[in-house]
Image (cartoon, grey):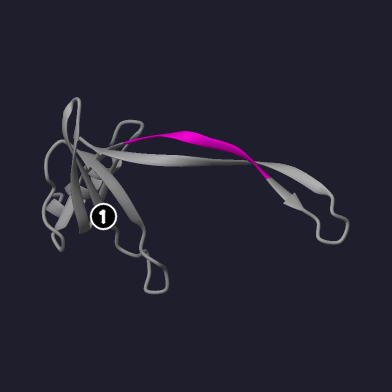
């Protein structure tokens, strides 16, 4: 039994190392910034919707080279990394005037093209 090209492509996407992934989408915009390490391209990529009723995801990719122009389709492997965001927020009860503090925990995700 032979394996067609689409099945091989699907398998290679599934066998990625930890903290890496395979994504594809359409380039929305791109900007270049100069850093001490050289040029850094920040490309906004819109991913396909899982269904006709879902909103498409949008991510920003970091790369050392241009990934294309707005409107181009792009696909490739990325390294997933990020950091946690923790901050306190205060709210005041309108009836009692009591002030309470809540700790908000979220994460900032980053994707670097391999």
**Displayed quadrant of residue 35:** top left
The residue lying toward the viewer, choosing from 28 and 89, is 89
**Residue 84: where, in percent of width, then height?**
50, 34
Confirm whether the magenta stretch covers residue 88.
yes
Left-right relation of 17 to 43? right
Q: Secondary structure at mark 1?
A: strand
Q: Residues within 10 Å of mark 1 (few under 14, many from 20)?
A: many
Find residue 94 and report its horizontal and vertical position in percent.
81, 60
Residue lying farthest to the bottom in this orientation: 52
- 54 or 1, nearer to the observer: 54
Q: In the drawing, does residue 61 fall left or right of residue 92?
A: left
Residue 33 belongs to magenta span: no
Q: Tell me what residue is drawn at x 60 percent, y 38 percent.
A: 87
Q: Is residue 14 left or right of residue 51?
A: left
Residue stretch in magenta: 80-89
Q: Name, please, the residue furthest toward the front.
A: 97
The residue labelled by disc 1 is 45
| Residue at horizontal 73 percent and vertical 42 percent from the top | 101
Q: How many marks?
A: 1
Residue at 37% across, 64% down: 50
Q: Quadrant of the C terminus?
A: top left
> Magenta region, mostly helix, strand or loop?
strand
Q: Return the x and y of residue 9 as percentages of the image width and height.
A: 18, 48
In the image as oriented, which residue stretches furthest toward the right? Answer: 96
> For the point 11% across and 52% down, which residue is it?
68
Report x, y in % for residue 49: 34, 65
Vertical position of residue 21 compared to residue 36: above or below: below
Front residue of this view, candidates 5 and 114: 114
Q: Quadrant of residue 65?
A: top left
């Amino acid at each position: 039994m032979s394996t067609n090209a689409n099945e091989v492509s699907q398998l290679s996407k599934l066998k990625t190392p930890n903290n890496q992934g395979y994504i594809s989408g359409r380039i929305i915009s791109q900007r270049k910034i100069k850093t001490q390490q050289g040029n850094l391209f920040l490309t906004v990529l819109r991913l396909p919707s899982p269904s006709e009723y879902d909103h498409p995801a949008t991510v920003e990719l970091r790369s050392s080279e241009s990934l294309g122009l707005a409107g181009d389709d792009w696909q490739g492997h990325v390294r997933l990394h990020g950091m946690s965001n923790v901050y306190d927020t205060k709210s005041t009860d309108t009836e009692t005037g009591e002030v309470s503090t809540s700790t908000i925990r979220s994460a900032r995700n980053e994707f670097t093209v391999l």
